[in-house]
Amino acid sequence: MLKNIIPLLFYLLPILLFGQDYYIIENPRGLKILNKYQQEISTEALRSLPEFAPFRIITEDDTLSDGFRTYKLAEYDGADYYLLTNDIGEFIAEAELGFTKRIKDAEKKDFEAVILLDDKVNSFSPDGKRNERLIKNTRLRVFFKDGSRYYARNITDHNFCFVNLSIKKENTDWQIAGSEAATIEISEHVVNRIKERIDQVNLAWFKLYGLFSEKTGNKKEAPYWEMEAGKDSLVCSLLNRGEKDSVTDIVNLIYNEFSVYCHGGRTEHLPR
């Protein structure tokens, strides 16, 4: 049974482990930053970094090619930056950084939203000191989702904020830019096909976690997908994700019993 489940595991792992960590930094110009060539960025490039910019962490606690300086490799607005750190992993600051917060396990997003009604959508400053209700026609560039809130930049005043964009209020209080045209009704056939696939995935997770419990005696609850279908919308949510360690445990179990070989786009799983 394990041999049959392994290919599904490698298909499902990216779905479960999609979390991204971000640093929100009030004054990123105070950081010691190198560009993708590991050279100090220009004064102009440094000044272009806005207040409360969200830096998506790619790797961290690594060492530069010089063999002694450490860094966190991060991405903002399509560009990669080496953010230099000290020996305990803290940012090296050449000026006061102000409010700094790490957002863990967020969902990367990249879309533009338009507010449709006055005073229906709430926004909050990154440091939580200010909040306001957005007015009609406000446009937002969305960077990531953290729980039920989204982190975005107001295109009008260029300020960053957390904003509540309720899925249930999409196309009523707000909408994705470019979706002004009439909504397309989702056919019953499409809904059934997606539900069938979700049922297969949920069954695979159930069997995989059951096998883990049988092998180790350590019972872990399996994650599962839940689908909500409407006339013109379909929302799929991954529930009971638990800790990433549970997935790591399962991966370790499989790698203890199987050797994995990759040949181009093909993966082979052979018993040890």
Image (cartoon, rainbow, N blue to C red):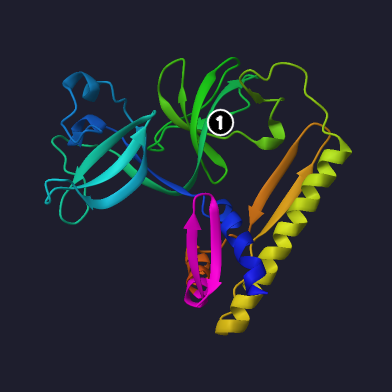
Front-most of 64 and 51? 64
Q: Position of residue 263 (x, y in %)?
A: 49, 55
- Quadrant containing the N terminus in the rendered view: bottom right
Question: In the current view of this chain or complex, which residue is farthest to the front?
Answer: 263
Question: In the current view of this chain or complex, which residue is farthest to the bottom?
Answer: 217
Q: Position of residue 89 (x, y in %)?
A: 22, 53
For disc 1, the neighbor class at 10 Å (few under 14, some 14 to 19, many from 20) is: some
| Amino acid under disc 1 | Asn
Residue at (71%, 25%) from the top-left corner? 171
Image-based side of 149 in relation to 34, left or right? right
Q: Position of residue 246 (x, y in %)?
A: 52, 68
Residue 259 colored magenta? yes
Residue at (55%, 67%) from the top-left corner? 269
Q: How many marks?
A: 1
Q: Position of residue 217 (x, y in %)?
A: 57, 85
Judged by its main secondary structure, the magenta piece is: strand
- Identify the magenta region: 253-272
Front-most of 219 and 261? 261
Q: Quadrant of residue 24?
A: top left
Image-based side of 49 in relation to 144, left or right? left
The residue beneath circle 1 is 122
Local secondary structure at mark 1: strand
Image-based side of 165 in relation to 77, left or right? right
Question: In the current view of this chain or complex, which residue is farthest to the right?
Answer: 188
